[in-house]
């Protein structure tokens, strides 16, 4: 892998200077989130996908044709060994993240891993230790943390705009028809609401409050043993709490509210990639709105490329210790609701 040089990642229309050469991405897996990533990456003038891999050569070739990608690999190992790939985006189901990301790190490739980062905190710790031992960049694809409007919200909260935070409320639920072969219902693929959807409200709460001192949770489980609808209460030594829920059987409002001693912030539907939020304090309200294109996965890709060009092995926006803390909370929730995955 040659050295990455040039300016920071730039979104289309932002007027940034052109880099010396594009950052060359490899995409590992060909499902829906991989397609979204490939689409959103087009918003970055200094990025290109040069290779894609699947366990099926035919699947890789179809994806490559769809997105005009030069090379299609029929194995993960071939992608990891591709000398023209600067960084790999791992887009497999959760259960394969440890193996796929580990393979790429062992081959010397920086990696962006889709969320939830792994099945559990132990696997997450193994990946983090591997990346740190080899001096390689590693980041969870928590695009919410990289969103400019969310970053503005966090800036306001940390600056005391609503005083001391007392509570965070957030939910993410979608209605998915039951199909035991679907990844959301399949324990072998890390199915259930928590890892796929619940990671968003948990990560949002911990972005604002940190790792909780206590975790309580209740859930409705499927006959296969994955969580269908889960309620979570995170408690903190400060007295603050976070009330969160996730579901694969019902479409929730997907909103968030942060309440403090001096005010409140309401984030409407789609809190994980908001178009606006409203700050309420001192009897007045102020609306903050997003600017520019909203291809959310481009924000995380731009952050990865900025870090690579700076020679950083971690992102300050999505720090690995924060990812590990979220994984510990998800483990605690699963312990409370009685969900275990094959092999654990």
Image (spheres, helix red, strand yellow):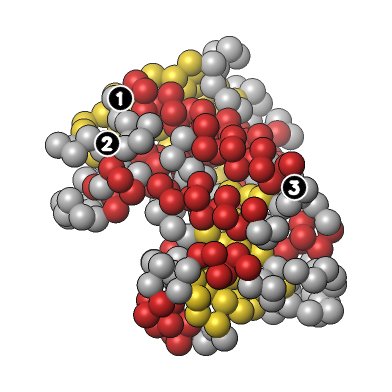
The quadrant the C terminus occupies is top left
User: Which image quadrant for residue 119?
Assistant: top left
| Contact check, label 1 and label 3, Cβ < 8 Å | no
Pointer 1 residue:
337
Query: At which x and y percent is residue 304?
Result: 69, 59
User: Depth check: 164 or 308 in front?
Assistant: 308
Q: Which label's residue is closer to the chain start, 1 or 3? A: 3
Whether residue 338 sits left or right of residue 105 in the image: it is: left
User: Depth check: 211 or 223 in front?
Assistant: 223
Query: At which x and y percent is residue 43?
Result: 61, 76
Picture residue at 30% right of the left edge, 45% below the top: 188
| Contact check, label 2 and label 1, Cβ < 8 Å | yes
Pointer 3 residue:
134
- SS at badge 2: strand
Q: Judge depth for marks 1 and 3 and give the one in front.
A: 3
Picture residue at 21% right of the left edge, 31% below the top: 220
Residues under labels 2 and 1: Cα distance?
A: 8 Å
The quadrant the N terminus occupies is bottom right
User: Depth check: 262 or 223 in front?
Assistant: 223
């Amino acid at each position: 892998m040659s050295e990455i040089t040039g300016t920071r990642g730039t979104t289309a229309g932002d007027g940034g200077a052109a880099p010396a050469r594009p950052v060359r991405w490899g995409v590992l897996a060909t499902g829906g989130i991989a397609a979204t990533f490939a689409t959103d990456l087009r918003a970055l003038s200094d990025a290109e996908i040069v290779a894609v891999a699947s366990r099926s050569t035919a699947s890789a070739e179809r994806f490559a044709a769809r997105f005009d990608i030069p090379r299609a690999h029929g194995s993960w190992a071939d992608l990891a060994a591709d000398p023209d790939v600067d960084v790999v985006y791992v887009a497999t189901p959760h259960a394969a993240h440890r193996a796929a990301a580990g393979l790429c790190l062992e081959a010397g490739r920086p990696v962006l891993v889709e969320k939830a980062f792994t099945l559990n905190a132990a696997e997450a710790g193994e990946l983090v230790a591997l990346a740190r031992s080899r001096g390689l960049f590693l980041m969870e694809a928590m695009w919410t943390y990289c969103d400019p409007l969310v970053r503005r919200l966090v800036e306001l909260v940390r600056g005391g705009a609503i005083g001391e935070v007392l509570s965070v409320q957030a939910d993410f639920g979608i209605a998915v028809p039951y199909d035991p072969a679907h990844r959301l219902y399949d324990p072998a693929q890390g199915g259930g609401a928590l890892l796929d959807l619940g990671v968003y409200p948990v990560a949002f709460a911990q972005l604002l409050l940190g790792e909780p001192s206590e975790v309580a949770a209740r859930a409705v489980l499927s006959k296969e043993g994955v969580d269908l609808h889960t309620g979570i209460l995170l408690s903190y030594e400060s007295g603050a709490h976070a009330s969160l829920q996730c579901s694969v059987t019902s479409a929730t409002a997907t909103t968030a509210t942060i309440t403090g001693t001096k005010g409140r912030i309401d984030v409407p539907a789609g809190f994980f990639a908001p178009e606006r939020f409203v700050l309420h304090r001192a009897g007045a309200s102020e609306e903050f709105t997003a600017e520019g294109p909203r291809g959310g996965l481009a924000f995380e890709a731009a952050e990865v490329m900025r870090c690579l060009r700076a020679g950083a092995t971690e992102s300050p926006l999505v720090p690995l210790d924060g990812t590990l803390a979220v994984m510990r909370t998800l483990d605690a929730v699963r312990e409370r609701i009685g969900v275990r995955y094959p092999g654990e």
